[in-house]
Image (cartoon, rainbow, N blue to C red):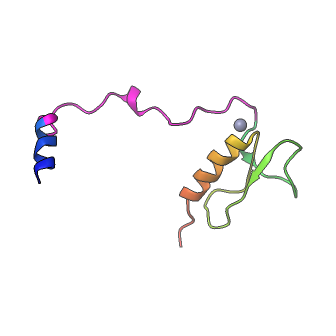
Amino acid sequence: MAARKSAKAWNKGMTGESKPAQYRAPVVDRCPTEDCGRPAEGDAPAAGWYRTDVPASSEPARDWCSTWCSAVGRALADLRRARR
Ligand SMILES: [Zn+2]
């Protein structure tokens, strides 16, 4: 346990204030595209849009403006599993 002892010495036994709120900012910026992440309607997303639909998620199917946004939406849907 030498490593643990030295780690505690380094941060003075984990004492002090928590990090200020600015260090807890969202990991991903909010998309500026209007209606990005809207609930899915119809059989397919509009041209150039991407749909996520995770059956086991509490998140509904949604349409996204880009592959990046759909990847973030998919990750959120994966994390928000439906309660069983
Ligand atoms: Zn977007």
Residue 18's x, y, as percent?
Answer: 26, 33
Between 49 and 11, the one nearer to me in the picture: 11
Q: Is residue 72 above or below residue 83?
A: above
Find residue 14 and report its image quarter.
Answer: top left
Residue 32 in the image, given as x and y percentages of width and height: 69, 28
> Foreground residue, 50 or 57?
50
Q: Residue at x 21, y 31 (%)?
A: 17
45 in magenta? no
Q: In percent of the image, x 51 and y 36: which residue is there?
A: 27
Quadrant where the N terminus sits is bottom left
> Is 24 within the magenta?
yes
- What residue range appears in magenta? 10-34
Left or right: 26 with respect to 55? left
User: Residue 51, image x and y in percent?
Assistant: 77, 52
Residue at 10% x, 37% y: name it: 9
In the displayed structure image, the side of residue 36 where residue 4 appears, left or right: left
- Name the quadrant containing residue 67: top right
Q: Name above or below for residue 67 compared with residue 83.
A: above
Residue 61 screen position, x and y as percent: 72, 56
Residue at the bottom extreme of this rendering: 84
Count of marks, rendered view: 0
Ligand 1 quadrant? top right
Query: Which residue is painted at 76% across and 39% down in the image?
Result: 65
Instruction: Tell me where residue 7 sits by quadrant.
Output: top left
Principal SS element in the magenta part? loop
- Is 16 left or right of 31, judged from the image as shown? left
